[in-house]
Amino acid sequence: MTRVACHKFDVLVVGAGPAGMAAAACAGECGVRVGLVDDNFRLGGQIWRSESAGGPVPEAAGWLERLRAARVDPLCGVRVFDAPDPGVLLAETADDPCELQYDQLILATGARERFLPFPGWTLPNVMGAGGLQALVKNGLPIRGKRVVVAGTGPLLLAVASHLRKHGAELAMVCEQASWDRLARFGIALAGQPGKIVQALQLKKDLAGVRFATSSWPVAAEGKNVLESVSISRRGKSETLACDYLSCGFHLVPNTELACLLGCQIECDFVRVDDFQRTSIPEVFCAGEPTGIGGVGLALVEGQIAGLVSGRRVAKARDLFAQRKKLRNFAAALAGAFQLRAELRDLPSAETAICRCEDVPYSRLLRYPSWRAAKLQTRCGMGPCQGRICGPATQFLFDWTPDSVRPPIFPARMESLAALASSPEPEQQAVTGGH
Amino acid sequence: MPSLALTVNGVTVDVEPGTTVAVAAMLAGQPCRVSVGGASRGPLCGMGICFECRMTINGKAHGRSCQILCEPGMDVRTDD
């Protein structure tokens, strides 16, 4: 029988982006034993993903140092797939299953991009906005490649700027929101000087690049791989030859683990109290799963959750005012990048909505709900478990997602078998440098 | 920077350390997978969510290639 590694922590943090790193550092500094798990091969999450050829991004360096000083155990390449009992999570690495035990749990599971289907969106080289950026950071050469960046949200400009710095030729940046909406968003930023500096910097980085508002992709074309993109711009269509389409429609929270644990969800987000506590007393949540708000808010929420889990409640209270200000920014963000109704008309009858099971738009039209469509067409039943088509069908058809069931990620049979047949897990030394 | 070599569907590709398997497959000119309906697919999310880039890596099926770093001598199959 496989020996199942068992790791025990006072505070376990799931997700090592800004919220999780801040939470783990603050909890660790309170003197409790903290574990920080993430399914990526390095700490930092998506926003602080480092370049393959470089060290950690500068913003992350300070937190990495605090994590080391606080003796937090980093467990990278570990993916949580089940929560069989209170205080226990099951996970697996690329090779082995493991059990994670905790007294208190902090969920910092971040967000993913929202993808909206349009004809040709399944062609190779049509990727997420952050998706292409991640691949470039992990070694994909982009110099001299022609790229269209499209979709919605502040990420588009950040991605465009990053790709340009790496030598990409930006054919166009297309934002679906109208100029009016963005201008109102600009006004809402006025109370936040730091954000304005960032925006001006991006404007400088993108000088000379075509940036269009009220503009979105209507089709991606190519024989076996992307060759061009058709863009709708103020009612007119234009076709742009390109090597890559980098396209995402803002973010959706990763709430699967919170749902599995039974945390209360309100309007798609995990409900938390002032102390970042979910409806389950020993479970906290911080960052994007509580509301899409960006790095600043994630860091503050993470610190609050970490401090409260380490019983430093007064210190946590000192951060409440800062959090309130950043939440106002988050609300402005949501308003500015709201999806326009025209995007519901993008799929053609043949457009695959569920990429895992190749379920076309026309087959889904007759069903009243996500559940009915799942049962009849296998939409959302593939390995991504509806993480891509779920948010898409929520927007296209107003379907509400189904309940979450374990395993929340496909797990290997060996993992399931080893854990099922291991009532008293062997205690093993916890990894990490002490 | 020293490079490392691996094979994707038998095609040898040299990459720099820190490169993910998904990127190595693209550099080798190999599509990630063929969909249920027979279409070629490539990476989409780049962060281990969409499973479009799953591959058999050193004999282990369903590896999320965008979350796995290349190692010397790795045997990657996208056509299993």
Image (cartoon, coloured by chain):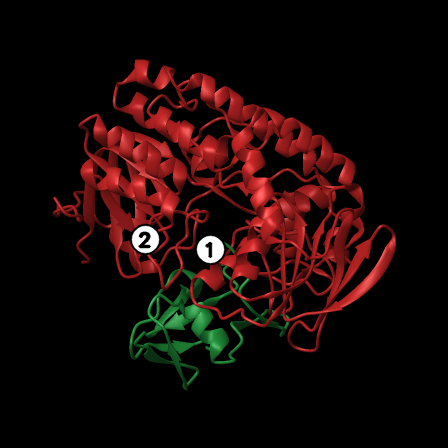
Chain colours: A red, B green
- SS label for mark 1: loop
Q: Is residue A306 left or right of residue A404?
A: left
Q: Nearer the viewer, residue A355 or A230?
A: A230
Establish if A266 lies above or below A167: above
- SS label for mark 2: helix
Q: Residue at x 37, y 53 (%)?
A: A40
* Rendering coords of residue A233 (x, y %): 82, 53
Residues indicated by labels 1 and 2 sit on the same polypeptide chain: no
* Three-letter amino acid code at the position of disc 1: Met
* Rendering coords of residue A261 (x, y %): 41, 33
Q: Which residue is mark 2?
A: A416
Establish if A243 lies above or below A155: below
Q: Nearer the viewer, residue A59 or A16?
A: A59
Which image quadrant: the C terminus of chain A?
Answer: top left
The residue sitting at the right extreme is: A235
Q: Is residue B17 left or right of residue A154?
A: left
* Three-letter amino acid code at the position of disc 2: Leu
* Rendering coords of residue A399 (x, y %): 68, 40
Establish if A125 lies above or below A415: below
Q: Which residue is mark 1?
A: B47
Question: How many neighbours does mark 2 have within 10 angstroms: few (below 14), some (14-19), or many (20 or more)?
Answer: some
Q: CA distance from mark 1 to mark 2?
A: 24 Å
Q: Nearer the viewer, residue B34 or A71?
A: A71
Establish if B33 lies above or below A116: below
* Rendering coords of residue A160 (x, y %): 59, 55
- Residue A311 visible in rendering: yes
Q: Residue at x 42, y 24 (%)?
A: A278
Q: Residue at x 39, y 55 (%)?
A: A50
Chain at tag 1 = B
**Image-quadrant location for residue A350:** bottom right
Chain at tag 2 = A
**Image-quadrant location for residue A284:** top left
